[in-house]
Image (cartoon, grey):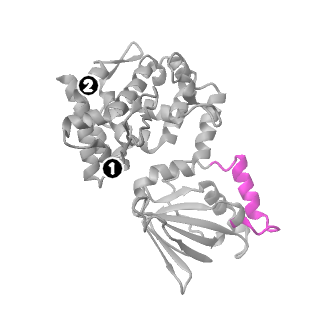
């Protein structure tokens, strides 16, 4: 898809990492100021994780600012639109910008969806030259798209989980982990004490929802690439089923602590499992992995176990998610078909080798691994086969 439209001004922002040894070199940023009358009405919105509801307070304030012609400063007051694209060019003679969208999974509106919808619904009430909006256009961010979308849309996540906490929707999780040492480390709303976000908890639990992912037809890649979706999934289940036995998260309660312990076991032992398959290799040299420096250990997510390495979640999530193959439901409860820790000891090296090699085929990119359905499927099949054997 290609869009062309006039803008008032256009600037390319230099990438500060182009001349440095490290950093994201592919990403490029462009800033444009555009008359709201000239904004195309077909910018792709599939990339925006927010649901645009124009009846709430924030959209009403955006509308009031847009239509208030006594203060012609909308482009200064509003954050504008953040757009991901594959290419962007500018014609100095016609003041026309050209934006190309190649992949609907990564290209389109990332942030500013409410602003965009408010503009489209109300700009006919304005004349040309009255109000302008800022466009931030990013290219080359496909590999970091999930992190970008999460960072730019934090307020929605905060709102969803904070409201869910006020409505006591997290009691299922709190009861399941109340005796664990990390129970007080989880924060359920903004400004809570703790260092484990409940959105991470919900993303991890999403991987083991066999009501939603019963087999190999679908894989929980959303746990890595769309945590906001995991929050909404949990809330939607609770709104529909409450704390009743049909709620998959209630069924999951007997194994929740196993899941979080399994996460830690994988995280702590990644280096050991790597050595099993690559005896002469150094796990710390794998792209995305960081090795201990100056004698200061890293600590695991839940049990704060000392670690020589920190591993990207793009590696950990698909490996952890593969243990969904061990689950079954009995009497409205999830249970293990086989001891998951014994399976991990047996297959850990194989799972890590598969993941690292997949990363290498994808350009040494752990983020690509985290969202690669093929890798999730291969790991799941490995555990499934191990169960059969």
What residue sits right under mark 2 in the picture? 345
Residue 335 position by quadrant? top left
In what quadrant of the picture does the C terminus appear?
top left
Residue 6 position by quadrant? bottom right
**Badge 2 element:** helix
The answer, for residue 212, to whether it is visible in the render is no
* Residue farthest bottom in this picture: 93
> Magenta residues, as a range?
53-75
Examine the structure image and report whether residue 60 is included in the region drawn in magenta. Answer: yes
Within 10 Å of disc 1 (Cα), the crowding (few <14, some 14-19, many 20+) is some
- Which one is earlier in the sequence, the residue at label 2 or at label 1? 1
Please give the name of the residue rendered at 34% of the width and 41% of the height, measured from the top-left corner: 315
What residue sits right under mark 1 in the picture? 287
> Is 253 left or right of 6, judged from the image as shown?
left
* Residue farthest top in this picture: 331
* Residue farthest right in this picture: 70
Instruction: Locate residue 282, reporting x and y percent.
Output: 26, 43
Instruction: Locate residue 3, reporting x and y percent.
Output: 49, 71
Instruction: Locate residue 64, reporting x and y percent.
Output: 76, 58
In what quadrant of the picture does the N terminus appear?
bottom left
Please give the name of the residue rendered at 28% of the width and 26% of the height, measured from the top-left corner: 344
Q: Is residue 56 above or below residue 349?
A: below
Please give the name of the residue rendered at 29% of the width and 53% of the height, measured from the top-left corner: 362
Q: Is residue 190 above or below residue 127?
A: above
């Amino acid at each position: 898809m290609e869009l062309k439209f006039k803008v008032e001004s256009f600037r390319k922002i230099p990438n500060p990492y182009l001349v440095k040894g490290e950093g994201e070199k592919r990403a490029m940023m462009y800033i444009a100021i555009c008359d709201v009358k000239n904004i195309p009405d077909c910018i792709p919105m599939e990339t925006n994780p927010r649901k645009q509801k124009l009846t709430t307070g924030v959209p009403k304030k955006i509308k009031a600012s847009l239509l208030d012609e006594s203060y012609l400063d909308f482009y200064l007051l509003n954050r504008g639109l953040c757009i991901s694209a594959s290419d962007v060019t500018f014609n100095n003679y016609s003041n026309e910008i050209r934006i190309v969208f190649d992949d609907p999974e990564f290209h389109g509106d990332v942030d500013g969806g409410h602003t965009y919808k408010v503009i489209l619904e109300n700009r006919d009430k304005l004349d040309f030259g009255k109000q302008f909006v800022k466009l931030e256009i990013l290219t080359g961010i496909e590999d970091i798209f999930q992190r970008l979308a999460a960072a730019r849309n934090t307020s929605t996540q905060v709102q969803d989980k904070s409201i869910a906490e006020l409505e006591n929707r997290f009691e299922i999780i709190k009861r399941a982990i109340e005796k664990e040492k990390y129970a007080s480390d989880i924060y359920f709303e903004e400004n809570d004490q703790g260092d484990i976000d409940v959105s991470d908890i919900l993303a991890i639990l999403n991987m083991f929802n066999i009501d939603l992912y019963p087999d190999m037809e679908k894989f929980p890649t959303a746990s890595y690439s769309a945590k906001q979706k995991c929050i909404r999934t949990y809330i939607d289940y609770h709104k529909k089923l409450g704390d009743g036995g049909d709620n998959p998260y209630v069924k999951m309660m007997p194994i929740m602590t196993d899941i979080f312990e399994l996460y830690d076991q994988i995280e702590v032992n990644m280096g050991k499992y790597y050595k099993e398959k690559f005896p002469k290799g150094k796990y710390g040299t794998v792209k995305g992995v960081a090795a201990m420096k100056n004698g200061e250990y890293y600590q695991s997510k839940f049990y704060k176990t000392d670690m020589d390495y920190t591993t990207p979640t793009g590696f950990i999530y698909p490996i952890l998610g593969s243990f969904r193959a061990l689950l079954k439901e009995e009497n409205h409860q999830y249970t293990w078909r086989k001891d998951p820790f014994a399976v991990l000891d047996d297959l850990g090296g194989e799972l890590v080798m598969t993941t690292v090699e997949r990363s290498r085929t994808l350009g040494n990119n752990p983020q690509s691994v985290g969202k690669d359905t093929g890798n999730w499927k291969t790991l799941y099949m490995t555990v499934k086969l191990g169960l059969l054997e």
